[in-house]
Image (cartoon, coloured by chain):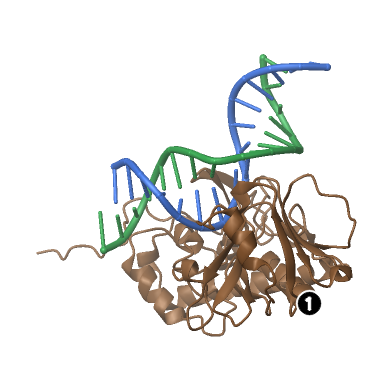
Chain colours: A brown, B green, C blue
Amino acid sequence: MPELPEVEVVRRGLERWTGGRTISTTEVLHPRAVRRHLAGAPDFTARLAGRRLGPAQRRGKYLWLPVEDGSHALLAHLGMSGQLLIQPPGTPDERHLRVRITFADAAGGELRFVDQRTFGGLSLHATAEDGLPDVIAHIARDPLDPAFDEAALHTALRRRRTTVKRALLDQSLISGVGNIYADEALWRSRLHYDRPTATLTRAQTAELVGHVREVMTAALAQGGTSFDSLYVNVNGESGYFDRSLDAYGREDEPCRRCGTPMRRSAWMNRSSYFCPRCQRPPRPRGDGRPSPARA
DNA sequence: ACTTTACCCTGAACGC
DNA sequence: TGCGTTCAGGGTAAAG
């Protein structure tokens, strides 16, 4: 499932293979793949024809290609199973091909959006002055962004009445984190997923953010090797980083720190993997608010 | 105003 | 063998 590192791998591929190219045609094979483009598929294709693409950008799990002068951008979200592929001319259609974009220089291959579960999609939007597509103005900066504001995150965490894993997955607080890297960062930080964010110290926030950044950087370093020369690849299924995971998917396997069997808990219609010894649950009483002063 | 849940979707893995 | 059920996941609209 593409989280920040996987999306960044795709961004780098797009930067290399689509930067500066001019779109010839766009073909939408499944309407859901452009559902965020409110004016519909015909408008989407018409407005892309003949337009030149700029260097690929990313924030969190979103990526976009500036169009022409940068006043608009072709926005992509991979959802759970989306892939953006550069395919040589004549390559047979993939089973779940949703959108095909061809270029004026056809020899360079075409851009394909392939998405089995159709949770992802493409759309065209106006951009703000900084180039950010308007529809993702609410997405927070991600921890690999030099302008990421850790102090602001800590303030927000202290104010909120929520738990730490929910907060990690909330893209308006910190973007790019999904279920896998959330569990990895929590394990590294020895924090239980149900820990109220209001109880986190500044040092704990700093450690948590540091671990998010570290695990993403490590994954990115390995994801970089998934490229083949003419192929922008999202390795959606396993990826190499699988072997390096310390928490996610390791139910009943020994904690790499203390040897205690790892556990899996049902959590928000998905799973949380954690070490019951290293990551102790919070005391049930706490909602994170300071105790009322006693008379 | 803030927090939580339901929903979208397909295919793999499972149980009977 | 085949059918039905469950699960996986991100983001957002809607509900609480």
Residue A246 in picture, x, y percent from top left: 68, 59
Quarter of the image with the C terminus of chain A in it: bottom left
Locate residue A129, reporting x and y percent.
48, 83
Residue A60 in sight: yes
Disc 1 target residue: A16
Q: Is residue A77 visible?
A: no
As displayed, is residue A63 above or below residue A113?
below
Assign the N terminus of chain A to one quadrant of the image. bottom right
Viewer-nearest residue: A103 or A220: A103
Q: Residue furthest left?
A: A295
Q: Is residue B8 left or right of residue A53?
A: left
Residue in the image at 53% along x and 74% along y: A209
- Asked whether A195 or A51 is in front, the reply is A51
User: The numbered mark 1 sits on a residue in which chain?
Assistant: A
Q: Nearer the viewer, residue A45 or A123?
A: A45
- Count of number-bearing discs: 1
Residue A258, quarter of the rendered image: bottom right
Q: Residue at x 49, y 58 (%)?
A: A165
The quarter of the displayed image where residue A286 is located: bottom left
Disc 1, SS: helix
Which x, y percent locates residue A69? 60, 83
Q: Amino acid at mark 1?
A: Arg
Q: Viewed as shown, does residue A269 lie left or right of A55?
A: left
